[in-house]
Image: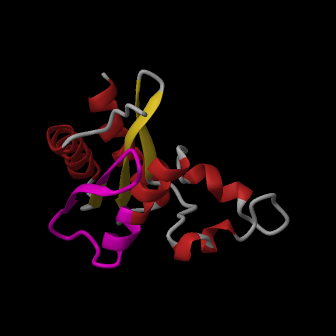
Amino acid sequence: MLTTSRLDIEDARKIIAAATLKAGEIGVPMCIAIADDSGNLIAFERMDGGKITSITIAIDKAYTAAAAKKATHEYGAASQPGAPAYGINSAIGGRLMVVGGGLPITANGVVVGSIGVSSGRPAQDLEVGQAGVDVFCN
């Protein structure tokens, strides 16, 4: 039998609140998704002005970060032509994201969930996502 730890709805609300605050500070309304340790959606918020097209992207970034147990931007270089993971972004029905904004969330060295953020540039998505991670990990 396995025992697992995962984020719950209260954790998700705190993480979204911190991410939303950071998005407000940088002036970019975001779509923010929180997933459990297996990549299934726990909570989602689309800020006023968050891009409609970013809804699915944020959810898939959270899915990727949890399921793969790594940040989505780490796939960026590895998925380019000639790189070892070229074409991986077409895996799992195209859900695997290879741009910044998806981060795993850990507790005691174990991935317990993830955050996916979309609507800004990848660096902005990553910054907002990190603010969410930081509130949980501190």
Q: Residue at x 49, y 57 (%)?
A: 64
Horizontal and vertical percent for residue 82?
A: 85, 65
State yes or no: residue 120 in magenta: no
| Quadrant holding the C terminus | top left
Horizontal and vertical percent for residue 54?
A: 35, 71
Q: Which residues are magenta?
A: 34-59
Horizontal and vertical percent for residue 113?
A: 37, 43
Horizontal and vertical percent for residue 51?
A: 29, 74
Q: Residue at x 28, y 78 (%)?
A: 52
- Colouring used for the render: secondary structure
Question: In front: 124, or 111?
Answer: 111
Question: In front: 99, or 104?
Answer: 104
Question: In front: 27, or 131?
Answer: 131
- Count of marks placed on residues: 0
Q: Residue at x 71, y 62 (%)?
A: 79
Dividing the picture into quadrants, the one containing residue 105 is top left
Q: Is residue 58 above or below residue 18?
A: below
Q: Residue furthest front?
A: 1
| Quadrant holding the N terminus | top left
State yes or no: residue 37 in magenta: yes
Q: Is residue 58 above or below residue 94?
A: above
Q: Is residue 10 above or below residue 100?
A: above
Q: Residue at x 55, y 44 (%)?
A: 70
Question: In front: 11, or 27?
Answer: 11
Q: Is 81 displayed left or right of 35 in the figure?
A: right
Q: Residue furthest right?
A: 82
